[in-house]
């Protein structure tokens, strides 16, 4: 391997077919070119090496030449690597059809499968899993939406049935864990339904590959992971990376501050957003009323983005918005992973067309974890939907 650059030290790891990774032990200011010889065929061809900034030691990535210049044996090796991607049969509830199609569009390794959702005359579910023998030995996933108590039973019936069809592994994707806000008891007699749902999911039958994997996003309280039993493997993901990517695209991305409506939101998300100036609001009681006040941070002249895990009526966000505007925020936007908005409460949020941050939002970002809300706000400002599809597709390959 000959380098067309000053000779920084390289640590190379090799596989049967060639170099799979190399690490630059000293920084190199210019791009690196190298001639690569296959360990099998000793045929020289030119590869490009890119540096990954900000790492110490500096990591560099080998980029292969165009496919049409790679020898036939190497082309076969690449095709073999692609074939090694885990093939997944993805079932879904009717409400999640749009998101399921977006997930499948992310990878050829994900194949959509159908379920017939019917009811008997008495209202109980009459369900049918199409081509059930065809999923034996396959990796199977189910995309669920527990948007109301009335749909949970029929989906649980399918969730409990799929692992018992001799599948290699089973993954439940539940983007929104709906009882997450009911995670503790404040008075004797309170029922923590977050614990109840966690226990129900913990008793999903074990597949041939072992316990069920559960993928969920921004569960309301991190301690809820301890509500799950040993027969399920929860994978707790976050929608915050989607927000970060969107903020980088804004024309005023260098003037962003992050506001948290209460201490709970700060504890939940501040480490993921620590590179932004931070503002924290707090709910305080005055007589019989609970009002929102500015606890710390300076919103004056800033585009302030309020961040929380979910929104219901939106009352807290609106009060926080008013406080930030009163203290001089130039623009105000909001992000929540789960836009629940019961009783069409999304209608409370107006669009700020410029210069009126106390009465309108510049942007209101939600994900597609709650499909009924996505349909309701489609094309309506200030709402934008950030899709979880790519994140879920990646999780299905774990």
Image: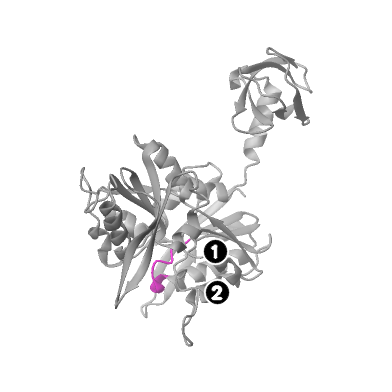
Mark number, residue 37: none
**What residue sits 66% from the left and 29% below the top?**
58
Q: Residues within 10 Å of mark 2 (few under 14, many from 20)?
A: few
| Residue furthest out toward the top | 4
Locate residue 160: give its quadrant: bottom right
Q: CA distance from mark 2 to mark 1?
A: 18 Å
Question: What predominant SS class does the magenta segment belong to?
Answer: loop
Residue hosting label 1: 222
Q: Residues within 10 Å of mark 1 (few under 14, many from 20)?
A: few
In front of the other: 283 or 240: 283
Residue 348: x and y in percent read 23, 60
Q: Label 1: state its secondary structure.
A: helix
The relative height of residue 133 versus residue 53 in the rendered view (above or below) is below
Q: Which residues are magenta?
A: 144-151
Residue hosting label 2: 200
With 359 as the anchor, is 276 left or right in this view?
Answer: right
| Residue furthest out toward the bottom | 189
With 10 as the anchor, is 159 left or right in this view?
Answer: left
**What residue sits 53% from the left and 51% below the top?**
271
């Amino acid at each position: 391997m000959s380098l067309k650059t000053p000779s920084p030290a390289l640590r190379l790891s090799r596989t049967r077919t060639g170099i799979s990774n190399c690490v630059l032990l000293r920084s190199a200011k210019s791009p690196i070119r190298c001639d690569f010889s296959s360990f099998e065929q000793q045929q020289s061809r030119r590869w490009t090496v890119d540096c990954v900034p900000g790492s110490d030691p500096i990591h560099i990535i080998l980029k292969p030449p165009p496919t049409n210049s790679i020898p036939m044996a190497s082309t076969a090796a690449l095709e073999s690597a692609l074939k090694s991607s885990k093939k997944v049969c993805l079932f879904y509830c009717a409400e999640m059809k749009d998101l399921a199609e977006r997930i499948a569009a992310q990878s050829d390794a994900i194949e959509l499968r159908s379920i017939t959702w019917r009811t008997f005359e008495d209202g109980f579910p009459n369900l049918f899993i199409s081509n059930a023998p065809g999923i034996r030995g396959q990796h199977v996933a189910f995309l669920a939406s527990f948007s109301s108590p009335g749909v949970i039973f029929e989906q649980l019936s399918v969730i409990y049935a799929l692992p018992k069809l001799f599948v290699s592994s089973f993954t439940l994707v539940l983007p929104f864990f709906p009882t997450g806000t009911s995670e503790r008891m404040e008075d004797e007699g309170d029922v923590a339904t977050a614990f109840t749902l966690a226990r129900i999911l913990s008793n999903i039958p074990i597949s041939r590959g072992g316990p069920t994997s559960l993928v969920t996003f921004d569960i309301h309280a991190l301690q809820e992971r301890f509500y799950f039993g040993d027969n399920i493997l929860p994978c707790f993901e976050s929608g915050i990376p989607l927000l970060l990517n969107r903020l980088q695209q804004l024309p005023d991305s260098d003037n962003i501050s992050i506001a948290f409506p209460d201490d709970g939101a700060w504890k939940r998300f501040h480490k993921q957003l620590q590179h932004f100036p931070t503002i924290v609001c707090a709910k305080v009681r005055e007589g019989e009323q609970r009002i929102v006040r500015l606890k710390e941070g300076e919103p004056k002249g800033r585009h302030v983005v309020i961040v929380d895990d979910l929104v219901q009526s939106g009352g807290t966000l609106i009060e926080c918005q008013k406080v930030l505007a009163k203290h001089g925020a130039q623009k105000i936007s909001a992000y929540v992973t789960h836009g629940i908005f019961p009783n069409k409460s999304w209608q409370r949020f107006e669009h700020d067309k410029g210069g009126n941050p106390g009465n309108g939002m510049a942007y209101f970002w939600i994900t597609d974890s709650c499909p009924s809300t996505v349909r309701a706000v489609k094309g309506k400002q200030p709402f934008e939907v950030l899709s979880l599809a790519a994140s879920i597709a990646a999780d299905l390959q774990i």
